[in-house]
Amino acid sequence: MTAPRPTAAVPDSLLEIDGLATSFQTPRGALRAVDGVSLRVERGQTVCIAGESGCGKSVTALSVMGLLPQAARVEGAIRFNGVDLLTLPPAQRRALRGRAMAMVFQEPMSALNPVQSIGWQVAEVFAIHGTAGRAEARQKVLALLRRVGIADPERRYDEYPHQMSGGMKQRVMIAMALANGPELLIADEPTTALDVTIQAQVLQLLREAQRELGTGILFVTHDLAVVAGIADRLVVMVAGRVVEQGSVIDVLETPAHPYTIALLAARPRPGLTRRGGDPLPAIPGAVPSPFDRVDGCRYQARCPRVQARCRTDAPALARVTRGAGDGHAAACHFPEGGLA
């Protein structure tokens, strides 16, 4: 099935998420994992979503791809090339996945089929979308494996996932995602289980693919070192909400939200140790349960500058004075440097 295309002029934003709210029905009631997230990804741009485990990063990515279980309820708007994905029939949305938009998952061993060869799994992407015949698909797969840095692709083509290292499996996942030249690539913590050398190689692969294809990338991570190396813009999330966003330079060099400041201070670096030397900073308190109703700011229980207003009024994203860009905003009543 042909993927739908907007009839009007192609919009500047490749992906525009507006007021996304994703919840799950559970025996304990509704669990809202994402609560009013809005962000944009332009063509050729990399936008990173960062935050602690459970803040809604991966659920946001899976909401865009339409890969959530049936118990999920997704509200708001997710516009891809001007078309709201949430209004599309399931068949039309499936036609976009793997062709116009693709995803690299966090754990390749779970994402790859253990009983099918690597070559077969990559070739399947062409078969599903009818973009290559069997003979042509094999040649395309071999070219993709070479492109992502897998040596001796003719031999690797017939191997199985258990015969490859973690870094090589992640390269296969990237090859699958890039097979049909997607306009949007979503990468959900693709370097988490890799050592720093392989991590750098994977990031370089993504940058090269972006330059060649003009792909927009939505990159999910908790690693600020990765953010600094790949992002154009950074979105910071806490408990399902965006608390700060802006250019990567503005957010990392002049953070405004107390959580972003604390997150940057907690980075391991020379001189900070658990024993001896200066103590390793940590963010106090615990992440609130998504089942608990929290009036006001979601970060209030852990914030060092909390005031009475923070406990009753939920702050909206507003432009801050810190940073040089107009798009630097924070959801805080009392951000560092003040509101613009």
Image (cartoon, helix red, strand yellow):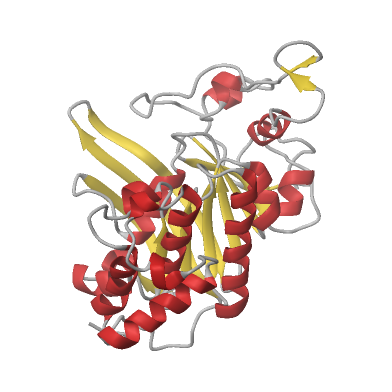
Task: Depth check: give the residue in front, 213 or 142.
Answer: 142
Asked whether the viewer can see residue 247, the reply is: no
Q: Residue at x 71, y 47 (%)?
A: 251
Query: Where's the N terminus, which quadrant?
Result: bottom left
Asked whether the viewer can see residue 278, the reply is: yes
Residue 123 percent location from the top left of the image: 31, 74
Residue 135 percent location from the top left of the image: 29, 87
Q: Residue at x 39, y 76 (%)?
A: 141
Q: Going by the picture, which residue comes out furthest to the top?
A: 276
| Left or right of 29, for residue 233 | right
Task: Depth check: give the residue in front, 115 or 262.
Answer: 115
**Residue 263 vertical placement versus 181 (above, below):** above
Residue 115 percent location from the top left of the image: 22, 55
**Residue 91 vertical placement versus 329 (above, below):** below
**Residue 180 vertical placement versus 36 (above, below):** below
Residue 157 percent location from the top left of the image: 36, 68
Q: Residue at x 27, y 51 (%)?
A: 68
Q: How many marks?
A: 0
**Residue 51 vertical placement versus 49 (above, below):** above
Q: Residue at x 70, y 34 (%)?
A: 264
Task: Depth check: give the residue in front, 159 or 315.
Answer: 159
